[in-house]
Image (tube, grey):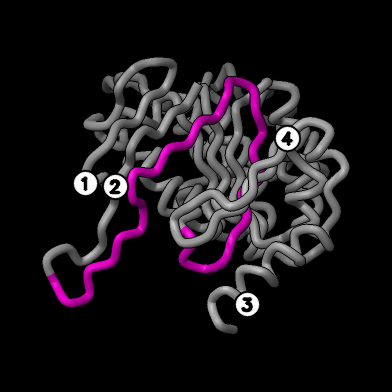
């Protein structure tokens, strides 16, 4: 289980531009949950993911995973158990390395490197099989540099690479936002398949309300650093896009828009 407990986070502290994003914020994600997270710009969605991953520190409060306090653990330590896919397809892969080299690096995450080759040739066929399931033709391009691939191909690779090693959490930060609609659908179907097969606890921030409704077993809406809607189970199955739009309209009216 993931637990954020009494989290406080300020931006520009001690200045006239000081802003409190999280004030005594509490949030839990149960093992095996797939949580879709929506919200207005500046609501704290991505900041929450950054806090969990260790990309930004908290001013006070605690972060627990499986009961272990990880509040002061470095980002690279947390990433041994957390896989993350970013909005920008370029962030999850190395453009100057080949597909094979990228896959091999991801396969060695958290392990010590010696003077031997970083490429495990015995895993080559396994990589091919993983890529073949994408139906993007990548299995025949193992020696092609990733920088030559399309954004969708790179994002599909990033998703597979983030889950190559055993992880406890998958963090998806608007991972379809930079893709065209057809490619985004492919990536979402792949996401759902991987999450279910590996039984991953998953948090997905998205601006696509249809994806938030169709995917996952829990839906959370955030606004100004608070959770304003949290539904799961049958309520989640029965929620409609219009219901979410109505909530967004309420928020917009409250903000004077």
Chain-order first, disc 4 or disc 2: 2
- In front: label 4 or label 3: 3
Q: Residue furthest front?
A: 254
How many residues crowd around disc 4 within 10 Å: few (fewer than 14), some, or many (20 or more)?
some
Q: Disc 4 designates what residue? A: 232
The reply to whether discs 1 and 2 touch (Cβ–Cβ < 8 Å) is yes
The reply to whether discs 3 and 2 touch (Cβ–Cβ < 8 Å) is no
* On screen, residue 199 above or below 37: above
Q: Disc 2 designates what residue? A: 8
How many residues crowd around disc 3 within 10 Å: few (fewer than 14), some, or many (20 or more)?
few
Chain-order first, disc 3 or disc 2: 2
When asked about the image quadrant of residue 4, the answer is: top left
The reply to whether discs 4 and 3 touch (Cβ–Cβ < 8 Å) is no
When asked about the image quadrant of residue 26, the answer is: top left
Label drawn at residue 236: none
Q: Disc 1 designates what residue? A: 59
- In front: label 3 or label 2: 3
Q: Is residue 182 left or right of residue 125?
A: right
- Say which of 161 and 177 sits in front: 177
Residue 95 visible here: no
């Amino acid at each position: 289980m993931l637990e954020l407990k009494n989290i406080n986070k300020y931006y520009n502290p001690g200045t006239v531009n000081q802003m409190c994003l999280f004030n005594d914020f509490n949030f839990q994600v149960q093992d095996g949950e797939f949580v879709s997270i929506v919200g207005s710009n500046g609501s704290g969605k991505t900041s929450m993911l950054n806090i969990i991953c260790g990309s930004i520190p908290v001013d006070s409060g605690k972060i627990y995973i499986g009961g272990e306090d990880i509040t002061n653990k470095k980002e690279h330590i947390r990433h041994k158990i957390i896989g993350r896919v970013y909005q920008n397809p370029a962030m999850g892969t190395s453009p100057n390395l080949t597909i094979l080299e990228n896959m091999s690096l991801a396969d060695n995450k958290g392990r010590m490197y010696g003077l031997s080759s970083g490429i495990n040739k015995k895993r080559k066929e396994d990589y091919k099989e993983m890529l073949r399931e994408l139906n993007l033709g990548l299995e025949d391009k193992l020696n092609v540099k990733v920088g030559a691939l399309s954004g969708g191909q790179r994002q599909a690779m990033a998703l597979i690479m983030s889950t190559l090693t055993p992880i406890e959490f998958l963090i998806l930060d608007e991972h379809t936002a930079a893709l065209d609609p057809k490619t985004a659908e492919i990536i979402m179907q792949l996401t759902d398949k991987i999450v279910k097969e590996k039984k991953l606890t998953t948090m997905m921030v998205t601006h696509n309300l249809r994806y938030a409704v169709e995917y996952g077993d829990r839906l959370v809406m955030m606004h100004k650093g608070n959770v304003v809607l949290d539904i799961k189970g049958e309520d989640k199955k029965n929620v409609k896009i219009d219901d979410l739009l109505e909530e967004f309209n309420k928020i917009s009216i409250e903000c004077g828009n």
